[in-house]
Image (cartoon, grey):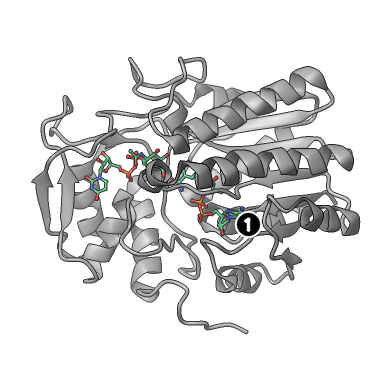
Amino acid sequence: MKKILVTGGAGYIGTHTCIELIEAGYKIVVVDNLCNASLEGLKRVRRIVGVDIPFYQVDVRDKVGLTKVFEVHNFDGVIHFAGLKAVGESVEMPIKYYDTNVGGTFILAEVMRDFDCKTFVFSSSATVYGNPKMVPIREDFPLSATNPYGRSKLMIEEFLQDVFVADDAWNIALLRYFNPIGAHKSGLIGENPNGVPNNLIPYISQVAVGKLDKLNVFGGDYDTADGTGVRDYIHVVDLAKGHVKALQALDEPQVLIVNLGTGNGYSVLDMVKAFEKSSGKMVAYKIVDRRAGDIATCYADVSFAKTKLGWQAERELDEMCEDTWRWQSQNPDGFLNETFA
Ligand code: NAD
Ligand code: UD1
């Protein structure tokens, strides 16, 4: 049975991926510094899968701490989710973002090399395509970044490609996620943003549950069917399954670059309607100015994921909204209420 280290495994995508890995027969170990997660999420994962998950509260920038984890466990590979992801905050605090995202990946790769563990799955983002000239977006489109968060992802992608050029024993997957939403069917785990959410679906769900008054729709004058921004929303469980497929595809040295999306684009107003239908709640909204840095339309060409990984997203928009709503309505305060020992 293969053993995988999951950094950032206590977070939103990490917890869902832990479940899929265990269900696919992997042993896992989680490292997380809990700066944007709580142990409650992992406790709930344990309840869902019925398996204990070794956990280390270690920062990926802490070489000594990481080394100790590698001394205890013999890993076949690493899935690296640990990092910071708020675009606005990255503009305010670039040093913190580069240090955590880029610096953390340097340290992790160093420790992996020291222990001859060279299978590396990295959480990249569709943000590396900048403002694409066309959609759907293919993996070979030009790359650019407009903020420190996006640049940190680009730098890490380039760094990992350099690592492979220098030593082609590495097996690296750069997974470019589109917009993950949704939650596990159990309603026990889901996205748990700190403070007022920046992203659309957490914001809509907090309006629906009554925590926020109304949604500000950023821009009604884009060149899209209804004037609002279009994105490729993907169910987090499909995304998690994509990680298992990527690990399985890393059977020989390579750098594998794959979009993980659905290939479908939905507007902000489509999402409001879909969420109202799933939740049975009204989502009040107001169209306001565009958000700086936003693009009109972004959705993936998913053909490479299909042929290379044998993976495609299976969950439709209604299911994404229903599962988000189950999580949100059953846990209006996120993981604040510790329900499981
Ligand atoms: P998240 O914040 O829920 O998970 C990240 C986890 O990493 C958290 O549990 C946090 O505590 C941990 N962490 C942060 N810094 C750390 C450090 N220095 N050492 C150890 N642990 C640390 O975010 P998520 O949505 O699950 O995202 C996971 C990864 O996917 C991130 O790298 C993110 O940039 C990337 N990504 C996310 C999205 C998205 O929309 N959620 C889109 C594209 C890419
Ligand atoms: C944002 C980030 C991107 C990151 C991604 C996933 C920005 C500029 N981009 O992408 O780098 O990879 O999250 O974490 O922050 N919207 C509203 N009102 C809101 C929130 C969002 O109208 O309160 C609109 C946006 O204008 C956009 C759509 O909803 O059209 C989706 O927004 P969001 O969920 O923030 O994701 P992205 O902008 O795609």
Which of the 4 image quadrants contains residue 54?
bottom right
Q: Tell me residue 193's x, y (percent).
A: 40, 61
Look at 75% across and 38% down and name the residue there: 109
User: Can the viewer see residue 261 in this picture?
Assistant: no
Q: Quadrant of the C terminus?
A: bottom right
Q: Position of residue 4 (x, y in %)?
A: 76, 50
Instruction: Please name whichever residue, 98 or 150, is drawn nearer the observer in this view of the structure.
Output: 98
Q: Nearer the viewer, residue 315 or 157?
A: 157
Amino acid carrying label 1: it is Gly
Indicate which quadrant contains ligand 2.
top left
Q: Residue at x 81, y 43 (%)?
A: 111
Q: Position of residue 174 (x, y in %)?
A: 61, 31
Q: Which residue is mark 1?
A: 9
Vertical side of 295 occupied by 95: above or below: below
User: Secondary structure beneath disc 1?
Assistant: loop
Label 1 CB, ligand 1: below 8 Å? yes
| x, y percent for residue 28 | 75, 57
Q: Give above or below for 29 relative to 38.
A: above
